[in-house]
Amino acid sequence: MIEPKRILIVDDSAVTRVLIKASLLNFRKDWVIIEASNADEAQKKLETNDVDLISIDYNMPGINGFELLEIVQEKYPEIKVAILTANIQDSFKEKVKSRGVSFLEKPVTDETIEKIIEICLN
Amino acid sequence: MFKLSEIQEDALKEAINISIGKAAASLNQMIKEEIFLSVPRVKFAKEKDALGELKLGPEKELSYVSQKFKGTYLDTEAMLLFAETDSLELVKLFLGQHINIEEMSSLEHEAVAEIGNIILNSCMASLANILHDEISGTIPEFVACKAKNIFKMGEKETVEQEILIIFIDFNIKTKEIQGYVILVLDLDSIEVFLNRLLKNLT
C-alpha cells in the first residue's frame, strides 16, 4: 500500500489552492494538503511539516516562485518541486527546467493533477 | 502624431491573433466552452476617449483585471474586462464543479483575478515568445467600477496622453458571456516593439 503523501501548495490565489486541493483529494483522498499564500508562509510551513512535494506559483507578492525554488533546493534537497504557473514564456520554462524540476502550466486541469501525483510517486 | 504603416499594423494584428489564440485556449481549458474571438482592433486614442471603442454605456457596472508587463521590447498594460453579471457567470463555469455556492461567493473576486492572471499571462507570454523577449508582470489587480471610470484610474496627464490600444472582443455564445482583452501600449516604446516584431515575424 502506498503511504499517503504530503503536498504543500504555494500560491497567492486562494482559488487556485482550493482547486488543486479539491482535485487532488478527489484522486487521492488520504493525501495531506498544506497551503501557503506566499514564500514566507511556505518556509514557515516547511519548518514544521514533513513535505513530499511542493507546488510553487511564480508570480507572488514578495519572494517570487523562482527564488523560493532556489531556497527549497538549497535547504530541502529531498523535497520534489513543481512550478505551476501562468507564466509560460519559453525563457522561463528553460530556467525552471535547468533547475531539474517540472514545469506545469495553469490553468489547473485533471492532467495537471495527474502530473503532480506522478511526480510525487516517482 | 504616430501612425502605423500597413506592414506594421499587419504584423501587430498577426502577433496579437497568435497570442490571444493561446489565451483563448487557456480559457477553454478552464471552462470547457468554445470561445469566439474577434479580429483585433488597433486604435490610437487618448485614454479618456477609449471607452467609446468598447460600446458600453458609461454607467455599466464592470469587473476587470489589470496587469502591467515589461521587457526589453515590450511595455504594456493588459486588461481583461467583463460586465459584472458576466464575470459572475464565468466564475460559476470556472469553479462550479469544485466548490459550493457559499464558498464561490466569497471567492468571486479572487476567481476573476485568477482567470485574468491566466488569460493575460498566456497572451503576453506568447507575445514575449514571438519577440524572443523576457518580460516580467505585476500581480493581477481586480477592479469593479462603472465603465466611465475604467480609463480614469491614472493621473490626469496620463488620461490626456495618446496611447495605442488593441481591443479583442471574445464571447462564449452558449452562455451569452462577452468580454474584452485590452492592451495599452505607450507610444514612447512602440517603435522598438514594432521593429522587433517585424524582424521576428517577417
Image: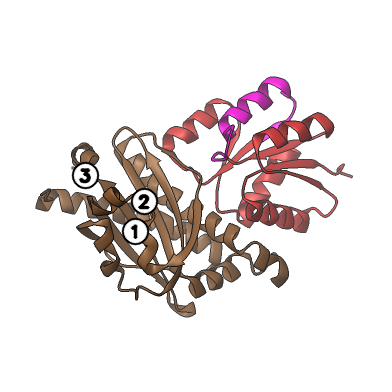
Chain colours: A red, B brown
Q: Are marks 1 and 2 on the same chain?
A: yes
Of badges 2 and 3, the one in the foreground is 2
Query: Which region of the structure is painted magenta?
Result: A58-81
CA gap, disc 1 to disc 2?
7 Å
Q: What's the residue type where badge 2 is placed?
A: Gly
Give the side of residue A80 with respect to residue B73, left or right: right
Viewer-side residue, A101 vs A11: A11
Quadrant of the rendered image containing residue B102: bottom right
Of badges 1 and 3, the one in the foreground is 1
Q: Residue at x 82, y 48 (%)?
A: A31
Q: Is residue B185 above or below residue B172?
A: above
Give the side of residue A108 with respect to residue B58, left or right: right
Pointer 2 residue? B154
**Percent x, y for residue B173?**
43, 77
Chain that bears disc 1: B
Residue at far front of view = B156
For the C terminus of chain B, give its image quadrant.
top left
Q: Is residue B145 above or below residue A93?
A: below
Q: Residue at x 60, y 64 (%)?
A: B108
Contact, CB < 8 Å: mark 1 with mark 2?
yes
CA gap, disc 2 to disc 3?
16 Å
Pointer 3 residue? B187
Q: What's the residue type where badge 3 is placed?
A: Leu
Pointer 1 residue? B151
Q: Of marks 1 and 3, which one's residue comes earlier in the chain?
A: 1
Q: Of marks 2 and 3, which one's residue comes earlier in the chain?
A: 2
Q: Residue at x 43, y 48 (%)?
A: B67
Residue A67 magenta-highlighted: yes
Q: Secondary structure at mark 2?
A: loop
CA gap, disc 1 to disc 3?
17 Å
Give the side of residue A112 with respect to residue B181, left or right: right
Callout 3 crowding tier (Cα within 10 Å): few <14, some 14–19, many ≥20: some
